[in-house]
């Protein structure tokens, strides 16, 4: 027997729609996430001959993801991928903040074994729920894969953790990814130990550029409860209304770090000669926020 196939896969559950229950199966949009235990999720999808160990890390709706839960999840993934008898890890997760968790885990841990994050768009008790198929697919991919790192595995697709984004609010194949583009900005990445030791989270706020963006929100926060960082989801190629740009320049002069992303779903940001602030390249605005948060953790730990 192939020794690789005798190794176990660890499933870490965090809740989400994949573990959700609808009040009425005919109205699957009305459901409560994070209701079904991981052992019950696996009951009907275990592949024959596969050695699986489960752990319920959390049971939440992923819209409620927190830095503290990221720490717990990071600690458990780091523990399991370091075990010689573990081939890989599968994480069940809600779709809402999945792209942030995937980016966080890949950036900090950069695991040398396959880590598959999977999910569902329909709750577990709906007859045509996509959860069981996605979980089975993630287990099979992890067992067969020689890949290293974090990937999102669902709806017949595999997306790298650092480039994935949720791009549709309803369809089953709700995730897309784009080819990495080198960012000119060098952000520091803390070690696993530094992230796990962090007790006071740096604050990074997200602001959207739009017609009439006057910077009032930025100035108000800077005057009363100044964050350490700002990510501006700019229009097009990360462009900013002149009034918002002026407010962010004031924030930068007061010590906040400002980073630009694009509010567009595709393309990211490319450098221009007239740039005032650095940009996050291909990262989505929410991923750029995670990147800046990690940078600040690293700076504070130094």
Image (cartoon, rainbow, N blue to C red):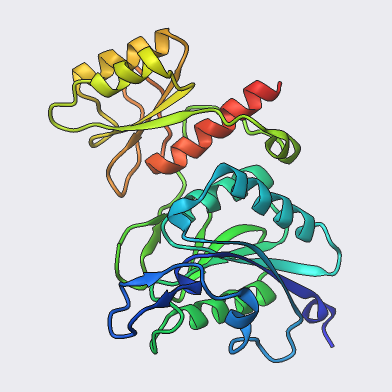
Q: Locate residue 106, reporting x and y percent.
A: 61, 49
Residue found at x 59% / y 86%? 45
**Front one among 114 and 253:** 253
Residue depicted at x 38% and y 15%: 224
Closest to the observer, 60 or 229: 60
Q: Residue 86 appears in which quarter of the rendering?
A: bottom right
Residue at point 40%, 30% (across, down):
205
Q: Residue at x 45, y 67 (%)?
A: 33
Measured along the vertical axis of the image, is residue 139 above or below residue 94? below
Residue 52 occupies quadrant: bottom right
- Residue 195 seen: yes
The quadrant of the picture occupied by the N terminus is bottom right
The quarter of the displayed image where residue 79 is located: bottom right
Q: Is residue 135 above or below residue 63?
A: below
Q: Where's residue 184, x and y in %? A: 47, 28
State whether residue 110 appears in this view: no
From this view, report whether residue 289 is shown above or below residue 148.
above
As drawn, the residue found furthest toward the top would be 253
Where residue 4 appears, x then y in whole percent?
80, 76
């Amino acid at each position: 027997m192939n020794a690789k196939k005798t190794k176990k896969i660890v499933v870490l559950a965090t809740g989400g729609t994949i573990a959700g229950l609808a009040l009425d199966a005919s109205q699957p949009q009305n459901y409560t996430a994070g209701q079904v235990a991981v052992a019950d999720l696996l009951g009907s999808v275990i592949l024959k001959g596969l050695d699986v160990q489960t752990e319920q890390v959390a049971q939440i709706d992923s819209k409620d993801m927190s830095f503290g839960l990221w720490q717990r999840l990071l600690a458990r993934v780091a523990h399991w991928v370091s075990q010689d008898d573990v081939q890989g890890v599968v994480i069940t997760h809600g779709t809402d903040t999945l792209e942030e968790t995937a980016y966080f885990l890949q950036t900090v841990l950069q695991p040398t074994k396959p880590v598959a994050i999977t999910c569902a768009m329909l709750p577990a008790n709906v007859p045509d729920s996509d959860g069981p198929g996605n979980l089975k697919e993630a287990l099979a991919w992890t067992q067969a894969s020689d890949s290293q790192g974090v990937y999102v595995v669902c709806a017949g697709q595999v997306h790298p953790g650092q480039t994935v984004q949720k791009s549709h609010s309803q369809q089953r194949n709700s995730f897309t990814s784009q080819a990495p583009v080198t960012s000119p900005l060098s952000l520091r990445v803390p070690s696993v130990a530094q992230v796990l030791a962090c007790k006071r989270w740096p604050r990074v706020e997200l602001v959207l550029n739009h017609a009439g963006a006057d910077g009032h929100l930025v100035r108000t926060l800077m005057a009363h409860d100044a964050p350490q960082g700002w990510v501006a989801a700019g229009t097009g190629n990360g462009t900013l209304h002149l009034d918002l740009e002026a407010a962010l320049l004031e924030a930068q002069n007061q010590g906040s770090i400002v980073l630009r992303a694009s509010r567009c779903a595709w393309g990211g940001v490319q450098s221009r000669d007239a740039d005032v602030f650095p940009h996050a390249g291909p990262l989505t605005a929410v991923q750029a926020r995670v990147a800046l948060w990690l940078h600040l953790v690293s700076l504070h730990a130094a």
